[in-house]
Image (tube, helix red, strand yellow):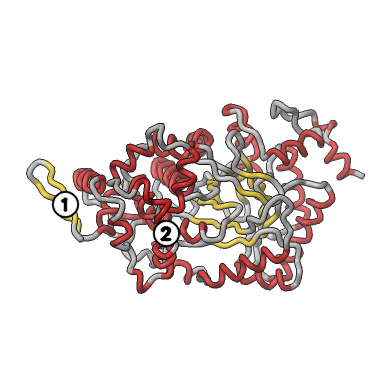
Amino acid sequence: MSYRYTIQNHTYHFNTLTTLLAKASPFRSGDALAGVAAMDYKERVAAQLALADVPLKNFLQEAVVPYEQDEVTRLIIDSHNTAAFTPIAHFTTGQFRDWLLSDNADGITLQQLAPGLTPEMVAAVSKLMRNQDLISVARKCEVITKFRNTLGLKGRLSVRLQPNHPTDDPKGIAASIVDGLLYGSGDAVIGINPATDSPAHVQTLLQMLDAIIQRFEIPTQSCVLCHVTTSLQLVQQKAPLDLVFQSIGGTEKTNKSFGIDLALLQEAYEAALSLQRGTLGNNVMYFETGQGSSLSANAHEGVDQQTCEARAYAVARKFSPLLVNTVVGFIGPEYLFDGKQIIRAALEDHFCGKLLGLPMGVDVCYTNHAEADQDDMDNLLTLLGVAGCNYIMGIPGADDIMLNYQSTSFHDALYVRKVLGLKPAPEFEQWLLRQNIMNEDGQLLSIQDHKLLQLINE
């Protein structure tokens, strides 16, 4: 099916829906690198105007990656909920945008709609939106998940405590964990990116994390971000594994580059459930994504990077995750060149994930060779707080000394909670109060009053 739009007596032709979506994307370096971006601003506007007239039903009839060759496409089509889609089935993409921004699209309505939406639909409508539109709609979406605490409630912002260490030194990791806890971070997860993926090494880290959580009765969960096959081995050994982690992508080829497929993820999901370690819920999966991952693996199938990213959310949605995190600026300026592109991509990812019913967090980050700085991250952090982001990262000094990139610090989390009146997860908040770490207004108390430090020193 071809699409066209005429501007000033010039007709722009778009041979496929895949091409149309790519040309309609706000400019980013990754799409230019892949050769799928619009030639200029006029072609981009023409594509956006043509896309606004595309009926949403077309996204069910024309796959951006052929059904026969891609299991992610098959998942998207085969799991589509027709009944949930029915209320908006008559909309064009442009009409869908207008409806999303109306008062008729409230939180409950959007929650009911989520199973009827495909990633391509939400990617398409995001391309017609300004940043404020993405924020306004995402803010309406409340996606709640549970394991040992309750994440995603309105008025709350959680933090992944990320105590990475270049040699996985237990003392260095433990020091970062205590530092983060004393600043009120860690309710989303205490999650370590290990320096090595060996099962024995990961098990040592899991046991350390479990001992800390059990000793101090912290209502949170832990995760060592190893490959899913390592997690499976550890489940068989009855290791204290709370969450199964995996990086995922939006095409079958991308996931193969990660050494996974849907069947393997299903096996890991069932294995994690069998441990029954959650006390409040059984959301046991933690996924990370990022625009550019499919292109960097030469597996984008001609699809623009933002649509590929949204398709990864279909993979995540199948397994009811506790956490989904777009590591938005991590891959580098080849894919998101500067602060402007990083901010736009993060707002798109958060919007698309939330609209699809996912508990979206964002790693507000950049690499040192990108045209971005901490002021850009301050802007993005504030925008995401307004948009209702479920969680962010908490890293000592905002500088990950193992992964060598810049993110957000424990202080940054305090800042955004304070200026926007946000609180930690309720169970974790009560723990902070009991430990005399924070008061009910979210203010840090004097360090000599911290019961946690008293316990550590015993």
- The span from disc 1 to disc 2 (Cα, nearest Å) is 28 Å
The image shows residue 300, relative to residue 221, as above or below, that is: below
Task: Give the mark nearer the N terminus: 1 vs 2.
Answer: 1
User: Which amino acid lies under the numbered mark 1 shown in the image of this protein?
Assistant: Arg
The count of marks equals 2
For the point 49% across and 45% down, the residue is 111
Tell me the residue that label 2 is attached to: 80
Q: Indicate the quadrant containing the N terminus: top left, top right, bottom left or bottom right.
A: bottom left
Check residue 4 in the rendering and tell me which mark sits there, or answer none. 1
- In this rendering, position of residue 345 left or right of residue 273: left
For the point 67% across and 63% down, the residue is 273
Give yes or no for contact between labels 1 and 2 (Cβ–Cβ under 8 Å): no
- In this rendering, position of residue 350 left or right of residue 457: left
Q: Position of residue 323 (x, y in %)?
A: 59, 52
The image shows residue 181, relative to residue 305, as above or below, that is: above
Q: Where is residue 367 in the image (x, y as percent from the top left)?
A: 50, 50
User: Which amino acid lies under the numbered mark 2 shown in the image of this protein?
Assistant: His
Q: Where is residue 20 in the image (x, y as percent from the top left)?
A: 25, 54
Q: Nearer the viewer, residue 278 or 428?
A: 278
Check residue 129 in the rendering and tell me which mark sits there, or answer none. none
Q: Indicate the quadrant containing the C terminus: top left, top right, bottom left or bottom right.
A: top right
Q: Which of 385 and 102 is in front in this view?
A: 102
Q: Which of 46 and 401 is in front in this view?
A: 46
Q: Nearer the viewer, residue 384 or 279?
A: 279
Residue 165 shows in the view: yes
